[in-house]
Image (cartoon, rainbow, N blue to C red):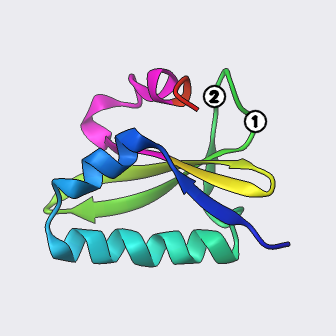
Amino acid sequence: MSFKIKALDFFLRQIEKLDEKSKRIIKQKIQIIKENPFKFKRIHSKRFNRVFRVRLNLKGKETRLIYVVLEPNIVIVCLLERKNDYRDLEKYLSKI
């Protein structure tokens, strides 16, 4: 099945602030997600069943790329810093 990548405005604003190396890393991960969206670890959410995360290390910070599979779309939600322990996840998922 072919998936289409959609990104929330919040995510687009987040990546605008990043340097070119970080953007390239994220772009590579999104390509992997498009090929197989179920490859990465599933995380629990109150709103959606198919929420996944990709581990990234951007500028020495542990970061997670959060996405939701809503067939035939993959919605890229946000970048979360690991130190915040996913506290803001449900707030970002409510924007879908």
In the picture of the structure, the residue carrying the numbered disc 2 is 45
Q: Name the residue furthest front.
A: 9
Question: Contact, CB < 8 Å: mark 2 with mark 1?
Answer: yes
Q: Residue at x 39, y 50 (%)?
A: 64
Counting labels gives 2
Disc 2 on helix, strand or loop? loop
Amino acid found under the numbered disc labelled 2: Ser
What amino acid type is highlighted by mark number 1?
A: Asn
Q: Is residue 78 magenta?
A: yes
Q: Quadrant of residue 86?
A: top left
Q: Give the range drawn in magenta.
A: 77-92
Q: Where is residue 21 in the image (x, y as percent from the top left)?
A: 19, 76
State the image coordinates of residue 5 (x, y, percent, origin top left). Answer: 60, 62
Task: Please give the name of the residue rendered at 40% of the width and 42% of the height, measured from the top-left corner.
Answer: 9
Compared across the picture, whether 53 is left or right of 27 comes to: right
Is residue 47 shown left or right of residue 88? right
Question: x and y percent of residue 16 in the render?
Answer: 22, 56
Q: Between 57 and 2, which is closer to the camera in this rendering?
A: 2
Residue 50 shown left or right of residue 88 in the figure: right
Residue 58 sits above or below residue 28 on the image: above
Real-space CA distance between mark 2 and mark 1, rounded to the nearest whole angstrom: 7 Å
* Placement of the C terminus among the 4 image quadrants: top right
Name the residue at 35% across, 51% down.
Answer: 12
Residue 69 drawn at (x, y percent): 71, 50
In the displayed structure, does residue 47 sit left or right of residue 17?
right
Rendering quarter of residue 32: bottom right
